[in-house]
Image: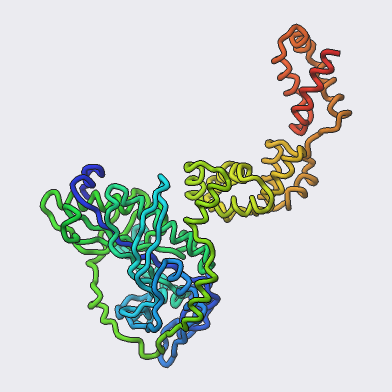
Amino acid sequence: MDDLMEYCEATSHFDPVLGIEVHVELGTATKMFDAAPNAFGGDPNTYVTPVSLGLPGCLPVVNHKAVEYAIRIGLALNCEIAPYCRFARKNYFYPDLTKAFQTSQYDEPIAHDGWIDVELEDGSLFRVEIERAHMEEDAGKNTHIGGAEGRIQGADHSLVDYNRAGVPLVEIVTRPIVGAGARTPEVARAYVQTLRDTFRALGVSEARMERGNVRADINVSLRPTPEDPLGVRSETKNVNSFRGIERTVRFEIQRQAAILSRGGAVVQETRHFHEEDGSTSSGREKSDAEDYRYFPEPDLVPVAPPREWVEELRRGLPELPVAKRRRLRAEWGFSDAEMRDAVNAGAVDLIDATVAAGASPASARKWWMGELARQAKDTDAALEDLAVTPAQVAQLQGLVDSGRLTDKLARQVLDGVLAGEGDPEQVVASRGLEVVSDDGALRSAVQDAIDANPAIVAKIRGGKVQAAGALVGAVMKATRGQADAARVRELIAEMVAG
């Protein structure tokens, strides 16, 4: 394990500088340069064509929809959209690259010189400058067999799946992020989370980090003061969780500070993040751009998006996440902490859709951040993957508001919905869970409770009104929790007094 300096000490002695490269897989129907399906999963090496496999004599063709999505991302990041750009070959050998090069963009990206404001936990905004956003293709996936944690070190052999090879990507590269100080890990997390939410708002990607749709390479360096030149950086590759991003930055600040404080030198290298303890470990020395021997891709013509098309795409941009969250927080009356929790849980859009379906903001939040969040945690699932829709949650709350369900019964109905038994109305009918509000049935149940508990009745008549709770409990038990508790209490008061 690397020596680490205490975090507060590290950030008091050194100025952290951050750089983040985010890769997002675009949600097109086909791959970047051929007609192979762009889909998650599938048997290994089935979503491929000769172009995906880089077989001799095959020529690529640019995916028009991928170009559109790249432009939409660039516009959302306040970038300049290049009137002319081209692809290049990034040359390196690795088994997941059958061509021994990756088709990417180098000196002529489709979008450049942008920025995005990210909201931190205290509600303040931090501006991140964007250097470029460029198009490229993804590589295949290696699975190393026999090594620890699935890594190549110590593996007996490796298996390669080319289903992902050729999937369209946009890579977004920041300029050095400075001035965050001790909040640098928080800025890193908030930035990637804002990008993830932006991709979803644009409709360009499912942006499922657990599936690798969004991955971040985290560059960290330290310098003695903000006036000093940039230090030597490490690059932790393919971090795909918000918590992992934050922990990576914190660990690297502590690790590098310990090295520099004892007079050592930080090595420019790639590193791997370890989820189990939040550490990083050395990978390989980092290659510079010249090592990749970039040159223009001879098999693809340049991309020159017409200005009219770019402006049409600009006019069609949706409300972006930071502005939307601030508007919704005001409309819903949520506190900063309530909104932050909803954002961190990935519940904002679900709450919004539930409110649009007729629920109040408070009740929508109650379900998604309460019972449904618990269900998601218990099943190790994302909220959005639960088998319930915002419309069903709104319908469930409507049954509570109308008095047909208590909160306790509503949770049982929700269990039925999650189990695939239908909409809330159907579950209520099939399970017989509706509140018993018929006075005749309630009076009968109350009379039974009175007859069975003469001592409690005597206490009530003697002035100990709180003793009525025991009779309410007896009626609720007899009706399997389906009685209207407020009406039961009224009837007890009336019938005991009579």
Residue found at the far top of this picture: 462
Residue found at the far right of this picture: 440
Residue found at the far bottom of this picture: 57
Q: Is residue 94 above or below residue 77?
A: below
Q: Position of residue 249 (x, y in %)?
A: 31, 53
Residue at horizontal 71%, vertical 38%? 409
Asked if residue 334 can be seen in this view, the reply is yes
Q: Position of residue 399 (x, y in %)?
A: 74, 43
Q: Position of residue 217 (x, y in %)?
A: 34, 63
The quadrant of the image that shows the C terminus is: top right
Residue at horizontal 41%, vertical 74%? 138
Q: Nearer the viewer, residue 144 or 252?
A: 252
Q: Nearer the viewer, residue 9 or 332?
A: 332
Q: Viewed as shown, does residue 123 lie left or right of 439?
A: left
Q: Viewed as shown, does residue 297 lie left or right of 222?
A: right
Q: Is residue 423 above or below residue 196?
A: above
Name the colouring of the figure: rainbow
